[in-house]
Image (cartoon, rainbow, N blue to C red):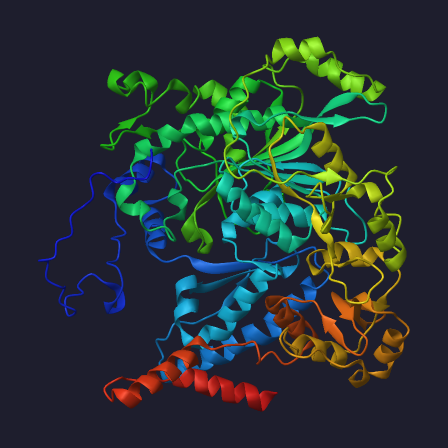
Amino acid sequence: MGGIRRNKRRQNHDKKPRDPSDWSGHKDGRGYKDILRENAKFVDFYRAQKLTDSEEELQEMVRAFQRDLPASFRITGFRSQAVAVRNIIESQFFRELAILKEQQAAESGDCPVVEPKCLTWYPDRMAWQLNLSRKDIRREEAYFKLHNFLISETDSGNISRQETVSMIPTLVLDVQSHHKVLDMCAAPGSKTAQLIEAIHSDETQIPEGLVVANDSDNSRCYLLVHQAKRLQSSNFIVTNHDATIFPKIHLTQADGSSSVMKFDRVLCDAPCSGDGTMRKNADIWPKWNGANSCNLHGIQYRVAKRGLELLAVGGKMVYSTCSLNPVEDEAVIARILSECEDTVELVDVSAEVPGLKFKPGLSQWVLADKENKFYAKFDEVPEVHHSLMRPSMFPPPVGEVEKLHLERCMRILPHQQDTGGFFVACLQKKAPCPWENKKTYETSEKNVENGKRPNADDETRTNPKKKQSRYQGFKEDPFIYLKKEDAETEFEEVKNFFEVSDVLRKEMFLTRCATSRKNLYFTSMLVRNILESNQDRLKVINTGVKAFAKCENKGSPCALRLAQEGSLMTIPFIKKRIVTPTKADLETMLLANDIDLPPKIADLSEVARNQLNALITGSIALIYEEKEDGKTSLLVELVGWKGKETLRAYVPKNERIHFLRLIGGDTSKFEKNKFDIKRGIQQNQQKSDPEVKIQEPPQSLVDTESIIQKAT
């Protein structure tokens, strides 16, 4: 309450400053004291669970947990430039690492070998893992180019720096472009990005399906918004709800009737204790105890149960955690399967990730209290722990557990392929769950087929109206769609100026301000239906791609211009004001800063000059294409502005370097070596203080640079 801290800690002014020579226990003699990565309870607990086949393998698992997590990333799959980005990584950055490895081996025979590893179970060589941690890449000058590349390409949305095991759930979910997908606990959004890529597998069409990304934390929802903006999806909605009580989503049919929308795919990446992430979150080591998982079992079960209720019959739900504790994993799955009887089954999805090493799910496990005392049955639990440990957390009886086929679950251990720990299970819904109102469900499905409105009385009886909770978080601007019958002159101007295809219908565009229309956002018709049919039911944080933006009066007859933030979704559907520059033209435009004078049209190629001279002042689309064997090998689509005598590309700095890399242009203007900058500062300081030491670049880096220059 308030903002007054009444019991303010007193400052100890008499405390002596710490002796700099006393850095015992600190890594590399600097920074915070290293966390001791040891916990006997952790080892004893997982020895009792029999996760591994032998004591030697258990110790190997523990040693893997004690090492830093290797860096991994994946290339955004649905972009037309994805293959080109992959080729650049393999031919340029990995080649430099190979040369650097040779130089390091020449200097010291025991130097660690730096090798990128392709994740073979991920499609099309689009995912990679390095035997370097993020900290190593950031701190070592030898990898500064790789570090700059990872940062800039992540900002532009062309790669995602994602943990290896985190890529698995969406692969086994098998999402198609027509699927309606719900990500129940989505933030920070790396798995959500994979789902978006899956429904946009065909770039030439607007998908029939959509992705609804939900998170209960209002502030974390904006991480999801950031992911969506990078991927430019028109079929994406961010919502802010408690996943255990996620509301039903209604759709309005053509005849005005209403139906409940069910999802074809549900991703339930449940909140967990996270002991599988101990390689990157070392603070879990001293805090870990077996009882922590018991506190999370209930909410994990309720999230999974609600996910099954929202799932359509025939659909799939993936339940995953970054915890190895069976109480959070098999116990939740066993409880769900037991209560669902034969309406839900556990599916073997190991074929979706060929080559992935994992352990099958457990059929027997034990629970532990804070003192690490083990209990195999609920009858053994003291009454004092009955509120912590419940019967549903223990394994089902032997006769029943065999019918559940818990061995179809997958548990990834860190030593198997040098990753974090993870658990994945896939459930398929064969019929409505027993606790669902069967009569209401069948009536609703039948009415949808016949185009009739469901019985409102049944809905009221089964779901009594609750008192509406107070809105928490930032109040979002409204979503106001254009109407087909309205005579908005702005959209007609845009349609005629760019000759917009009929695929982008007027009703797909919305604005966020009722009084003035500075920007037009684009969504699919399904997204519009959901937003307009659930205004009082669904708390929407963000949706839509920025397609057109208001431009200042610069001599253009059209008040709106193309927005680079939505170029991938809009440029394929316009027919006029398209310019096809050469590689040299594109490089000239990308190297020009916003503060510099834009390139003159007279300095461009003859092809570009002729196309530009035929156009009046205003926004244009720049399309650069490379072909191999008659097929498009690279397609770059940018937004620009044609002035009277100049041409400017409306591309942010972080995207400029990306496009320059794609076309093989000079990126030195944007590549900054922070270590060189630091040396420059040290040299300036040395002039006034000769004792200041200058950190010289490692010889292996100098040799590598010279070899690369000779090769090129």
693 and 71: which one is in front? Answer: 693
**Residue 460, quarter of picture:** top right
Lateral position of residue 565 relative to residue 67, left or right: right
Residue 1 coordinates in the image, percent (x, y): 33, 33
Q: Is residue 496 left or right of residue 304?
A: right
Q: Quadrant of residue 699?
A: bottom left
- Does 614 appear above or below 65? below
Q: Is residue 553 visible?
A: yes
Name the foreground residue: 303 vs 594: 594
Residue at 31 percent across and 34 percent down: it is 290
The residue at the far left in this view is 14
Residue 524 x, y percent position in the rendering: 76, 42
Towards the viewer: 335 or 689: 689
Residue in the picture at 30% in, 40% down: 288
Q: Is residue 25 left or right of residue 666?
A: left
Q: Splitting the image into 4 quarters, where does residue 346 fall? A: top right
x then y, percent, for residue 655? 63, 67
Please report the residue visible at 78 percent of the width from the left and 85 percent of the height from the top: 603
Look at the image and tell me whether residue 634 can be seen: no
Number of numbered tags placed on the structure image: 0
Q: Is residue 573 above or below residue 619?
A: above
* Of the pair 203 and 528, the residue shown nearer to us: 528
User: Would you place residue 624 above or below residue 711 in this image?
Assistant: above
Q: Position of residue 701 (x, y in %)?
A: 44, 82
Q: Quadrant of the C terminus?
A: bottom right
